Image: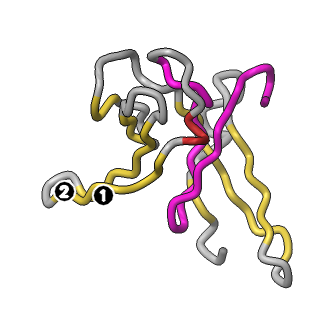
Amino acid sequence: MVHGRKIALFRFQLRVFAVGAECPHQGGRLAEGEVGDIEDMVEGRTCYVTCPVHKFQFDLSTGAVLQGKCGPLPTYPVRVSKVDDNQHSAMIEVGFESLGDDFFGDFGVDDDF
């Protein structure tokens, strides 16, 4: 729970995504779903999560429905910053509409992480 919202965090390779924790279709727990990627020659790589209940698939970057018919998945900007070199830990910050547009100017993982 972050600011009263159920949020799921997914890490795929060096990218971290923050999305609504429940499938918009019928509330399946997305944290229990499969995470993967699709490589497209035109659009590049798309990271997705599959709902474990009805197998609907969502783009983790945009929330767009890739398979199934329902509303989009809420997505939130994420900033990851290194905390400790020795233990390889990081701080993950999740953004909301109440923050200014420039608060998360550079999304994703810090270059030296």
* As drawn, 32 above or below 29: below
Query: Which residue carries the number 1 mark?
Result: 45
- Looking at the image, residue 90 sits to the left or right of residue 19; the answer is right
Report crowding for label 1: few under 14, some 14 to 19, many 20 or more residues within 10 A (C-alpha). Answer: few
The residue labelled by disc 2 is 40
- Image quarter (top left, top right, bottom left or bottom right) of the C terminus: bottom right
Q: Is 23 above or below relative to 113? A: above
Q: Residue furthest front?
A: 53
Q: Secondary structure at mark 2?
A: strand
Which segment is the magenta one?
Answer: 1-24
- The answer to whether residue 26 is left or right of residue 79 is left
Q: Are marks 2 and 1 in contact (CB under 8 Å)?
A: yes
- Residue at image x 74%, y 52%? 92
Identify which amino acid the numbered label 1 is placed on. Answer: Arg
Residue occupying the point 58% across, 41% down? 32
Image coordinates for residue 21, horizontal then vertical, percent: 62, 30
Q: Secondary structure at mark 1?
A: strand
Viewer-side residue, 97 vs 16: 16
Instruction: Name the kind of residue labelled 2 in the image.
Output: Asp
75 to the left or right of 1:
left
Choose top left, top right, bottom left or bottom right for residue 7: top right
Which residue is located at x 51 percent, y 24 percent?
A: 23
